[in-house]
Amino acid sequence: MSNAALGADYAQAVERLAGRVLGALRGTQVPLPAVSDADRPADTTALAAVRVMGPDLFAPALFCRQPLPQPDRDTLDTALRVFPPRPGDSVEARWRDRTTAALLARGAAGADPAGPYAGGEPYADEDSERAALAEAAGIAGIVEDAEDTELTWQERSQRMARLAPLALPEVDGPYQQRACLHVRALSRGATRSLMRRDHPTAARLVRWLALAQSRGASPALDVPTVLDHLRLWGAPSARTALDLAIARRLLAATEGGPR
Amino acid sequence: MSAYGPAAEEVRTTALRTGTRALDWLHRNHVQGTFADGATAELAEPDSVYKPLAELSLAASLVMRDAAFPAAQRDTAGELLDFAWDQLRGGDLLYERQLRFPAMTDPLETYVHFHRAGYRHERLQELLAHLASLTSYREYEHVPNRRMAVANATRVVGGADPTDWPARTAATWLGSTPEPWTMDWMTAYHVTHTVFHLTDWGAQPHALPPHLRDYLATWLPVWTDVWAEIEEWDLVAELVIVDACMPQPAFEPDAWRRLAAAQHDDGLLPRDGRTGGDGDGRRFEDHYHTAVVATVAASLVLSRLGA
Amino acid sequence: MSVQTTPALSPVRAGVAERAALTALVDEPEAPFSDAPVYSPQGTGVLLLLALLSPKTPKESRPS
């Protein structure tokens, strides 16, 4: 298979998986349905999709305060072994992996109010999962981003757009705090993406704005209005729709509504 | 070095170089903006020569007013004003046009630039003072920022100015601080002109109410970035002027860097990245406006940064 | 599932091409080309619309 065909294959798999995560997020089914192709553990394409989604896989579980279904845990575990984190990965990829690993490490007990970066959480029982987690956390943990304070609003927005899967409830860390701290820069970045009609990037940034608002920060944009605009004008990709749905849920939580 | 720091020093240097070259280009090419013999008050094609003359005069009058360019550029500006005033037959053409069309505001809006630079046409001035006293003249149904243009020109020419500026400002798009991401190309020009007239081209930065200062301080960098990326140089230069009209300009070097890089060796600054090639037969007609805007931007920036 | 007890089921690590395809999706950049608004002659359609909506000369009213 050519590289382009492989890329297209993976992108399609991500779309399918994002669509199923979106369905689980919108559904009211308890326990949550598994979303990954657990019956095809050796399907590299399906595993790649799981790795691309990363922390997004946990979105329904986190919003419903439910554990991640075991089949999804197993698939994620396999995916981490087939596509292990590497020292050469981008800062953004390493932070996504670190968050994925931390969420897995919360075990089957569901949300951990201490957040994924609190030390001492027990690993899950399975040896393989433990190994995958140790590897992910070990590599992703070496994250040097001291230069972060020097970023322009454009650079910060680009970085945060790639880190959008970290904008989740019950997940805390430096980037969630930075979203609140730099809410004006991200508002500018979202406006810029909207004007460039780059709706996927705009949706990722608005997801961060929704998180910041849910944690008491004041975006310079009216987030619900932007969400509406993106829903009506945005590209109909499942990944973008998931970003928008997560943003909506984050806002709903702020307003005291159901999550 | 000024209190603004090294970034502002870079802006000063770049603005001086880019603005000087734009002004010199206007000066070398201004004869292309000459009326055919026998131009009358009717002006069948007001956009062909009349409008460019008015805009040339605007830039030159601000170079004189701000007195921030070196003496050589101020002399150049003076020559351009003399040329334009001569084209308008010492103001007679404006006077005749205002007599013929009392409801038109362009004679006032053109005359104001000469008035700012010390030129006078007494009979026209009398007409304008009378018109300014009419409720009708103030209330003709222009789009809101055009009404501000008339009000500001009246203010500068010295007529009684009963304008309710806060109400006029509130009636503009900018006045209601809308969703910044809905900004489009034409609206951007409406916004820049609202600020130009409200602050009398940067002479009164504090005329901008605080809520508009905050709004512009937040979103101007975004709009500038978006249109600089697609090389809309004319609009980028207008947005740079808006920054210079603010009580606390940001003096971002990036926009100036990009404008300087887009400027041709002969000083022509193309209105956008799609035009302005050497085979372009309408170089003055298509690009004089951008030279005007760049000259004004440089004059204001140099003035605000201090000598 | 345990690596130690079921080595046959343990999938192999992805190759270079697979890694590259994954990385492209994880590190997806913003749209490379801006589609920001520019002057559009179609915008003058608004003016045409206004002209079409301008009032007609009133007709003489007739008592019904």
Image (cartoon, rainbow, N blue to C red):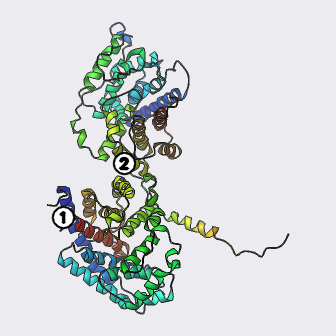
Residue at 46% across, 45% down: A222
Give the side of residue B256 with respect to residue B35, left or right. left
Mark number displayed over residue B13: 1
Mark number displayed over residue A188: 2
Q: Please indicate, yes or no, whether residue B273 appears anywhere in the rendered image.
A: no
Give the side of residue B227 with respect to residue A199, left or right. left
Chain under callout 1 = B
The residue furthest top is C5
Amino acid beneath label 1: Thr
Q: Mark 1: which secondary structure?
A: helix
Count of numbered labels shown in the rendering: 2
**Closest to the observer, B208 or B181:** B208
Chain under callout 2 = A
Amino acid beneath label 2: Arg
The residue furthest left is B1
Residue at 20% across, 59% down: B8
Mark number displayed over residue C4: none
Up the image or down, A62 lies above or below A190; here it is above
Give the side of residue B35 with respect to residue B266, left or right. right
Up the image or down, C40 lies above or below C18; here it is below
Give the side of residue A29 with respect to residue A144, left or right. right
For label 1, the crowd category at 10 Å Cα-Cα, with few meaning under 14, some 14 to 19 and many 20 or more, is: some
Residue A106 in the image, given as x and y percentages of width and height:
37, 18
Q: Which quarter of the image is occupied by the N terminus of chain B?
A: bottom left
Instruction: Using the numbered discs, state the Cα–Cα distance from disc 1 to disc 2 in whole angstroms.
Output: 28 Å
Up the image or down, B130 lies above or below B20; here it is below
Residue C38 in the image, given as x and y percentages of width and height:
43, 60
**Closest to the observer, A94 or B202:** B202
